[in-house]
Amino acid sequence: MLRLTSNELLHRQPSQASRDAIGRYGERAAARYLKRHGFRIVYRNFRVPAGELDLVAREGEELVFVEVKTRRRGHLRGRPMDAVDQAKQRKIVRAALAYLRLLGHPEIRFRFDVVEVWMSEEGRYPKCHLIREAFTMPADWRY
């Protein structure tokens, strides 16, 4: 029989399937949150070899590339935004540029936002926090 101490239980990593389910849950919650705040979702899970965009939205005339980061309440690893490091930002920017190429390089303003989603332990509604212009395209990159 396998026995785990309370310390081991606290530090066990969720399975990949569990992490994927949490990510999908967070993306749905973020999309609902953005819609309630006037955004229009135009694409979900845009994937290219260079990277992935969780959500592509419009806010007025501006195109918004949205990275969603979800955490369980009580998660010990800081804020969800902390996971959007420079390497992750570059992947998101590459995917965004691929998306814009597919649109034919339109003259459109765009930005990169992050939605932090905290899951409640009681199964209640998640808490979402929008970080507008969370990061920018590297200065040496061109669109």
Image (cartoon, rainbow, N blue to C red):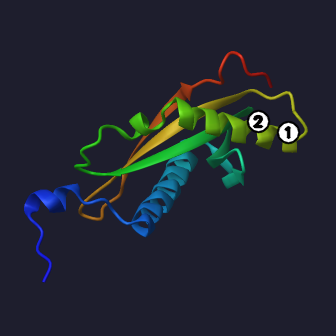
Closer to the camera in the image, 36 or 5? 5
Q: Secondary structure at mark 2?
A: helix
**What residue appears at the point 40 percent right and 66 percent down from the top-left corner?**
18
Q: Answer above or below: position of 42 versus 22.
A: above
Please tell me in which quadrant of the rendered image residue 61 appears: top right
Mark 2 and mark 1 residues within 8 Å of each other at the beta carbon? yes
Please tell me in which quadrant of the rendered image residue 2 appears: bottom left
Q: Residue furthest front?
A: 1
| Alpha carbons under labels 2 and 1: distance apart | 6 Å
Q: Which mark is residue 101?
A: 1
Label count reads 2
Identified by mark 1, the residue type is Arg
Residue 8: image location, x then y, percent: 15, 60
Residue 92: image location, x then y, percent: 63, 39
Give the residue number, with chain letter if any, for mark 2.
97
* Left or right: residue 103 compared with residue 125: right
**What residue appears at the point 35 percent right and 58 percent down from the top-left corner?**
125
Residue 6: image location, x then y, percent: 9, 61
Q: Residue furthest right?
A: 104
Q: Residue furthest top?
A: 139
Q: Answer above or below: position of 81 versus 17.
A: above
